[in-house]
Amino acid sequence: MKDSRPAEDGAAIRRRRICPVCGGRFTTFERVQLRDLVVLKKTGRKVPFDRDKLARSVEVAVRKRNVDPERIERAVTGIVRQLESSGETEVPSGEIGRLVMEALKTLDDVAYVRFASVYRNFREAKDFHEVLGELKGEEEAS
């Protein structure tokens, strides 16, 4: 091992390593996992929670938007912490979607609408108008 230090506000350990065979260098991130989470799908199926899948879905929503990758990582870490600290081992997929929507609302309005269009299964233009109305209503309230 070459170097080890805290990352993600202490939520992970970043380690720089060197391969003893080829001499190549690489970085690993180790995270504390409070409990094994299971996602309860709408179909009733249960699948293991996958932090990387959560991160990918947030990254797809913010693709080609000017959002700092560190803010994205903090949002994903925050969602995972909320899920782990809820005390539940089974989490409905809808709850994860709701938490992602809340996080995206603070990151980027366009990413929020993109995610909402998939999460809420938009079928027509009025669905977009409703979400845009929600955003506008919150701007006026603040």
Image (cartoon, rainbow, N blue to C red):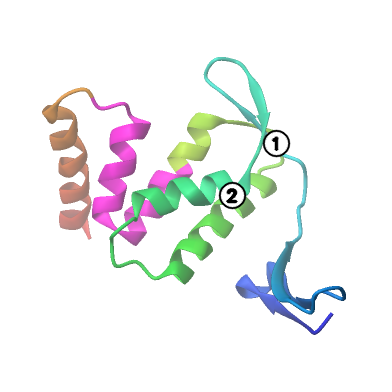
Name, please, the residue furthest toward the bottom.
Answer: 2
Q: What residue is rendered at 70% in x and 66% in y?
A: 29
Q: What residue is rendered at 17% in x and 43% in y?
A: 132
Measured from the top left, where is residue 14 in percent x and y? 71, 74
Please name whichever residue, 129 or 54, is drawn nearer the observer in this view of the structure. Answer: 54
Q: Amino acid at mark 1?
A: Glu
Measured from the top left, where is residue 21 in percent x and y? 86, 73
From this view, report whether residue 52 is shown above or below residue 92.
Answer: below
Q: What residue is rendered at 53% in x and 31% in y?
A: 93
Q: Magenta stretch? A: 99-122
Residue to which mark 1 is pinned: 88
Q: Is residue 59 left or right of residue 87?
A: left
From this view, report whether residue 90 is shown above or below residue 78.
Answer: above
Is-magenta flag for residue 107?
yes
Q: Disc 1 or 2, which lies upstream in sequence?
A: 2
Q: What residue is rendered at 30% in x and 48% in y?
A: 112
Q: Is residue 55 left or right of residue 133?
A: right
Please name whichever residue, 121 or 106, is drawn nearer the observer in this view of the structure. Answer: 121
Please name whichever residue, 77 or 20, is drawn nearer the observer in this view of the structure. Answer: 20
Q: Is residue 79 left or right of residue 5?
A: left
Q: CA distance from mark 1 to mark 2?
A: 20 Å
Name, please, the residue furthest toward the top.
Answer: 43
Sort mark 1 into few (<14), some (14-19) or many (20+) by Cα contacts within 10 Å.
few
Q: Amino acid at mark 2?
A: Asp
Which quadrant of the view contains residue 26?
bottom right
Q: Quadrant of the N terminus?
A: bottom right
Predominant SS of the magenta segment: helix
Measured from the top left, where is residue 97 in percent x and y? 46, 38
Is-magenta flag for residue 83?
no
Measured from the top left, where is residue 134 in percent x and y? 21, 42
Residue to which mark 2 is pinned: 52
